[in-house]
Image (cartoon, rainbow, N blue to C red):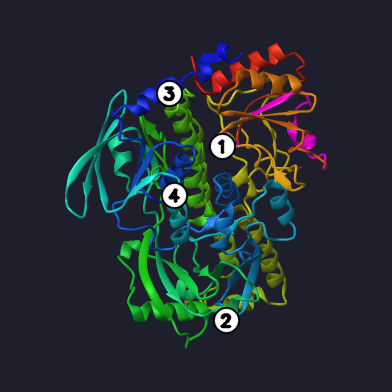
Amino acid sequence: MAQNFTDISGAADRLDQATASDAYDTDVFIVGTGPTGATAALALATMGVRTMMISQWSWLANTPRAHITNQRTMEVLRDLGLENEAKQHAVPWDQMGDTLFTTSLAGPEIARLRTWGTGDERSGDYLLSSPCTMLDIPQTLMEPLLVRNAAERGAKVAFSTRYLGHEQDDSGVTVQLQDRTTGHEYSLRARYLIGADGAKSQIAQELGLELVGHTARAGTAYVRFRADLSQYVAHRPSILHWIMNPAANFGEIGMGLLRCVRPWNEWIAGWGFDKDAGEPDLSLDAVTQQIRTLVGDPDLKVEVDGVSTWYVNQQHALTMSSGRVFCGGDATHRHPPSSGLGSNTCMQDAFNLAWKLAYAVKGYAGEGLLATYDEERVPVGAQIVARANQSRLDYAPLRECFDTLAEDGTHTVDAGLERLRAASPEGAALRAEVGKALELKNYEFNAHGVELNQRYSSAAVIPEPEAGEEVFLRDPQLYVQPTTRPGAKLPHTWLVNTGGHRVSTLDVSGRGKFTLFTGLSGQAWKTAAERLDLPYLRTVVIGEPGFEDPYANWGRVAEIEEAGALLVRPDGYVAWRQKSAEWETDTAQERLRAALKTVLALP
C-alpha cells in the first residue's frame, strides 16, 4: 500500500536530483564550532546531511567555560552515540556533590548543600527520570569530542576561516568567507545557514533578530590556576566552593568562587568587581594573593594559567531565525553560568534544529516544519535566561545570615561566625534562616524540573484539547513530571532486549527517526506502519522480543491503552498520541498518516 502515500514518502527522487546538481556546495553551512555549532554538525552528519562548519580561530575552546552537563544533554550525547566517550572526559556525578559555603577552603564551614541531584533525598528522582546521570565536562574537552566525531562522520570543518556575510534567496544561501591564512575571499552556496557565532553574533545582527533584556549587569573576574588542593577538598568532593570572605564580597552574589576544573589540581577562582570603577587589578601578585585568601593558605603554590573578566547578561531573542538562516546558543540567549544551563541549552537548540533541517533536506518534511524551531526554542531561551539571573539574586538571603559589620564599619569573618554560632535566641534564629536560604538554592542546584520539564507547543506537536492544561503535582522547577502528553519528552523506563540487557525507552527511539510505540494488542498500528513503509519511521511494540517489559513499568508511564499509539519525534519529544485502543488497521493507517503529515508540514 506504500504507493498510495507518495505525499509523505516519495521525495527521494527530488532529493537525488537536487543533490546530484552543482547548485549547492553543502546542504547546511554552520558558522561557529562551539557547543551549538558542533552539536548541529554532529547530528546532521550522523543523519547523512552534507554539512560544513567553520571557525575564525585556529582551534577550539581554550578555556574551560561551560562544564555542567545535565541529563537532557547527556541523553542527546547518548542518542548520538557519544555518552560513553563523554564519560571518559568527565568528573563523574558522585564527585560533583556537596557545594560548600565556607570562609575559605581551609577555614570554618558555614553550610553545605547536596547539589546536582547527588543527595540521598534527590538521587532517586534523577535515576528514575533518565538512563543518564549528570556529568561535569569542561568545554575544552566537550568541543573536541563533538567536532572530531562530526568530522569522522562526514562533516567538513575549516578553521582560520572568517565569516564575512551572506545573502539568501528562495532556494538557498550564499555565504561569503575569507581564508585568514592567505586573505583569499570566496563564497559557498548552501541550502541553509546556522549562525552559532556566539554572544556577539554577526549573523543575528544581520537578520535583525530582536533581543530583549540588557547586557553587562555586573562584572566578574576569573582566574585559571593550578594548585594541589586535594587536602582541602578530596574528603568532601565538589566542583563548586563558595567563599564568604570580605576579600570577595562585592556584587549581588557577594561571595568568591573556587570551581574545580579537574580534580583536584586545576581550578578557576572568581569574584565580583565594580565595573563602574574600571577593570580590576589582575596582576600576578594581586590574583595570587586573592587565590591564597580564598583557599586560606598564605603559602599556597599557585600557577596562574590565565586571567579574564566577563559581564553578566540578561538577554534572549524573540525570534531565532529568518528564512533559511537559523541562530542558536549564545547568539540568542545570553546569561550568567548560574544554574549550569548555558551549554546544555545550546546543545539542545542544535538537536532540535538538526533533525528538522535533515528532514527538509531529504524531502521528508515541508518548509513549515522549520518554523517550529522558533516556536519551541524561543520560550526555552526566555526561561533559562530568567532562571540563571534569578539564581544569582537568590544568594542574598544566605549572605545576609553571615554578613556582619564590625564596629569600625568593616566586614569581618570572625564577627559573622560569632553571630551564626551564638548560643542565643539570635543565633538560633539565624541558623533557621540559613536553612531556609539553603532551600532556596535548590532552585539553582537541584532544579531537575527546569532541566527536564520543557514542554513544546508548536505546529510539530498535535495537541489534545480535551486533556486540558497540564497540572503539575509538585514544584515544576524542582521535580520532573513524566508524561506522554504531546509536546513532552518521552519518559524513560527500562525495557529488556533479546540479549537480556536493560535498554531505555530512549534507546529504542530517536536516532534520526520517528518511533511509533504501541503494545502487543496494537497490531493494527504495527500493520499500518508497515503499509506506509516510510524510511524515517520505526515501530516499537512493547512486549515483543527486543522490547520486553518484565518490570511492568511501561504501563505506568505510557498513559495510553495497550492498543493505543504514541508517536515520538527524532528528538525524543512526543508528537501525537491516541490514548484509546484501535483495532481497525485501515483506521490506524489513516490516523497515523494524518499525524505525520501534520507534524511534518506536508501538503
> Horizontal and vertical percent for residue 467?
70, 24
**C-alpha separation, residue under disc 4 versus residue under disc 1:** 22 Å
Residue at numbered disc 2: 106
Q: Between disc 1 and disc 2, whose residue precedes?
A: 2
- Amino acid tagged 1: Asp
Residue 124 in magenta? no
At horizontal 64% and vertical 13% (from top left) the residue drawn is 590
Q: Is residue 65 visible?
A: no
Q: Nearer the viewer, residue 533 or 66?
A: 533
- Mark in front: 4 vs 2: 4
- Amino acid tagged 2: Ala
At horizontal 64% and vertical 69% (from top left) the residue drawn is 111
Q: Is residue 542 visible?
A: yes
- Mark in front: 3 vs 4: 4
Label drawn at residue 367: 3
- Amino acid tagged 4: Glu
Residue at numbered disc 4: 152
Q: Residues within 10 Å of mark 3 (few under 14, many from 20)?
A: some
Q: Residues within 10 Å of mark 1 (few under 14, many from 20)?
A: many
Label drawn at residue 80: none
296 w.r.t. 21: above or below: below
**C-alpha separation, residue under disc 3 versus residue under disc 4:** 29 Å
Which segment is the magenta one? 551-572
Residue at numbered disc 1: 571
Q: Quadrant of residue 208 in the image?
A: top left
**C-alpha separation, residue under disc 1 versus residue under disc 2:** 46 Å
Q: Residues within 10 Å of mark 2 (few under 14, many from 20)?
A: some
